[in-house]
């Protein structure tokens, strides 16, 4: 099962490490059908795609000049902070900077942020008041949204 076409602009944009994560995730998607009835939470299917998405965002932001090499290679950058549209320090807000690019406007940064929240924060953080388990279908939908967000962003690159 391929969630990203191998001849696509997105696939060609991804680094080898990110392609490996995507391929791992595709393998999990193929194998998860053998576990029907044995798994109560399919969040594990989302993990390799969420990790690849984070790597994609770092590469994408670096390529657009929205972050510096030190941010990209450092351990301190927090995508959830700099992509957050409500981040108070606008000089560090990638969301605000991306919105200023005429090619991206409001749509692309909003899409990148929304799937970050839905596919990473809400899946991988524990909230006792909102304990969340994913069905296989919900996990597949989130994965599809990760791919669409990345395709939308890369589609506007030269």
Image (tube, rainbow, N blue to C red):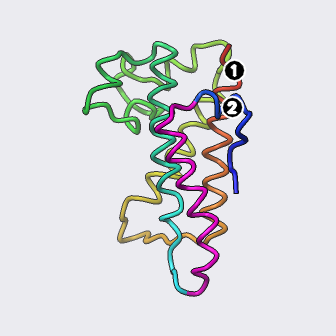
Q: In the depicted view, which residue is nearer to us: 133 or 28?
A: 28
Q: Secondary structure at mark 1?
A: loop
Q: Residue at x 53, y 52 (%)?
A: 119
Q: Is residue 45 above or below residue 135?
A: above
Image spot of residue 78 (x, y percent): 34, 35
Q: Is residue 14 left or right of residue 66?
A: right
Residue found farthest to the bottom? 37
What main secondary structure does the magenta stretch of the protein show?
helix
Image spot of residue 111 (x, y percent): 62, 37
| Residue 87, picture quadrant | top left
Q: Are marks 1 and 2 in contact (CB under 8 Å)?
A: yes
Q: Secondary structure at mark 2?
A: helix
Q: Residue at x 52, y 58 (%)?
A: 46
Q: Is residue 153 above or below residue 38?
A: above
Mark 1 to mark 2 CA distance (whole Å) = 7 Å
Q: Is residue 17 magenta?
A: yes
Quadrant of the image for the N terminus? bottom right
Residue matched to label 1: 156
Q: Which portion, as a residue range, is magenta?
A: 14-37
Q: Which mark is residue 152?
A: 2
């Amino acid at each position: 099962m391929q969630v990203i076409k191998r001849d696509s602009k997105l696939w060609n944009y991804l680094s080898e490490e990110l392609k490996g994560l995507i391929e791992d995730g595709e393998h999990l998607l193929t194998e998860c059908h053998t576990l029907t009835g044995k798994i109560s939470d399919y969040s594990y299917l989302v993990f390799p795609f969420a990790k690849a998405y984070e790597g994609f965002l770092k590469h994408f932001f670096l390529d657009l000049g929205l972050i510096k090499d030190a941010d990209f290679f450092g351990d301190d950058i927090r995508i959830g902070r700099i992509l957050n549209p409500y981040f108070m320090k606008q000089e560090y807000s990638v969301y605000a900077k991306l919105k200023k690019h005429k090619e991206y406007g409001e749509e692309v940064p909003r899409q990148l942020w929304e799937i970050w929240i839905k596919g990473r924060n809400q899946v991988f953080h524990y909230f006792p008041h909102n304990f969340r388990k994913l069905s296989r279908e919900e996990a597949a939908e989130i994965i599809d949204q990760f791919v669409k967000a990345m395709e939308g962003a890369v589609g506007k690159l030269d």
